[in-house]
């Protein structure tokens, strides 16, 4: 990519590595109003990455109107939103501690955020093609409202009814443990997806009485008698199974990064009393973790001893 960023730092680092480095800096600004100090913050970060005297110009270019790099658009309320793949607008990943909370999922949806969260298989839902039925009015009392004629089934029962034969093998990423039977360290398993309508009294119904439909994803290994994990996602109806699985499994990448931050880089070792000191400690720790990530992504980096 022949962008001003790469031209400015071309003598300092490989272009692909530079793109990754800049992309790791941008999420710090989030998706709310762009802070007044954002340009100065990014300028300082670019300077440390080797952008030199053009750091200020590049910072403004990145935040204002990039053509082929993270794009910021202005919403109706004036907020600047980043549409890049590293933006927080990308699907939220969470374990069942959050995924089982209906209000948490509703809060994400109300904010226009997509999610792929793990859930407990005992929760209930109607099948995606279920249709509410309005009972005939007898002429007494309030007219009846549309309701589903059949009771909801648990997530587990819905997947079991679909059968293991509908599960497909999906590889969501490459790992690090190579074996004779898996020389590429591909992380794969068998998954299936169903369009369902979660049943909960906290979920508002549509005007026709229907409940919102979402994806139910289940991991069902060939040697397992039943599915081992379940996720819900409000991604679009045309989303592929591979994309759903990749996003559902993304939480383990987050867990790995947090473990590295805590045990390897000491993000919890701060013992000061000031916010400034804490902020500096966290900033340096996160930058160190970003540097470690860049080393792993750089194909030219020397392998660890």
Image: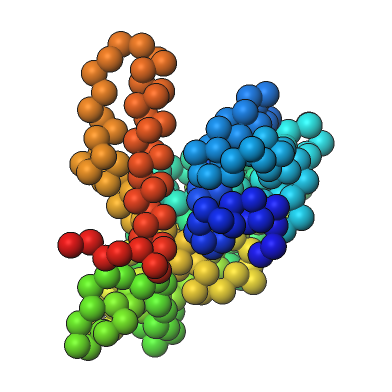
Residue at the location (62% across, 28% down)?
A: 40
Answer above or below: position of 66 versus 111: below
Compare residues 228 and 140 and report the one nearer the observer.
Answer: 228
Answer above or below: position of 221 versus 17: below
Residue at the location (66% across, 56% down)?
A: 7
Decide if residue 118 is in sight here: no
Q: As drawn, is 284 to the left or to the right of 238? A: left
The spot of residue 175 in percent (x, y) is 31, 70
Residue at the location (30% across, 41% down)?
A: 261
Quadrant of the rendered structure where residue 136 is?
A: bottom right
Compare residues 42 and 209 and report the one nearer the observer.
Answer: 42
Answer above or below: position of 151 versus 161: above
The spot of residue 80 in percent (x, y) is 72, 37
Q: As drawn, is 265 to the left or to the right of 249? A: left
Q: How is the image coloured?
A: rainbow
The spot of residue 53 in percent (x, y) is 64, 38
């Amino acid at each position: 990519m022949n962008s001003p960023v790469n031209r400015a730092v071309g003598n300092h680092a490989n272009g692909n590595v530079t793109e990754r480095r800049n992309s790791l800096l941008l999420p710090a600004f989030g998706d709310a109003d762009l802070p007044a100090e954002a340009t100065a913050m990014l300028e300082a970060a670019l300077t440390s990455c080797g952008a030199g005297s053009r750091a200020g110009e590049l910072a403004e270019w990145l935040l204002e109107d990039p053509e082929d790099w993270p794009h910021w658009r202005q919403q109706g309320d004036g907020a600047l939103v980043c549409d890049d793949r590293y933006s927080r607008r990308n699907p939220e990943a969470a374990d069942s501690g959050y995924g089982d909370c209906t209000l948490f999922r509703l809060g994400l949806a109300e904010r226009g955020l997509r999610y792929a969260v793990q859930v407990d298989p005992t929760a209930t839902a109607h099948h995606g093609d279920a249709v509410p039925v309005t009972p005939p009015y007898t002429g007494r009392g309030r007219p009846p409202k549309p309701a589903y004629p059949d009771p909801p089934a648990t997530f587990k029962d819905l997947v079991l009814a679909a059968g293991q034969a509908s599960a497909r093998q999906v590889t969501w990423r490459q790992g690090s443990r190579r074996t004779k039977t898996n020389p590429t360290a591909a992380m794969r398993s068998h998954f299936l997806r169903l369009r369902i309508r979660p049943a909960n009294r906290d979920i508002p119904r549509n005007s026709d009485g229907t409940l919102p439909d979402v994806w139910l994803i289940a991991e069902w290994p060939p040697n397992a008698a039943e599915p081992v994990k379940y996720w819900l996602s409000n991604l679009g109806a045309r989303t592929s199974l591979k994309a759903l699985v990749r996003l559902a499994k993304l939480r383990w990448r987050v867990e790995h990064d947090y473990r590295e931050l805590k045990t390897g880089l000491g993000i919890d070792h701060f013992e000061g009393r000031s916010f400034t000191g804490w902020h500096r400690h966290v900033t340096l720790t996160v930058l160190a973790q970003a540097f470690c990530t860049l080393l792993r992504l750089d194909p030219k980096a020397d392998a660890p001893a």
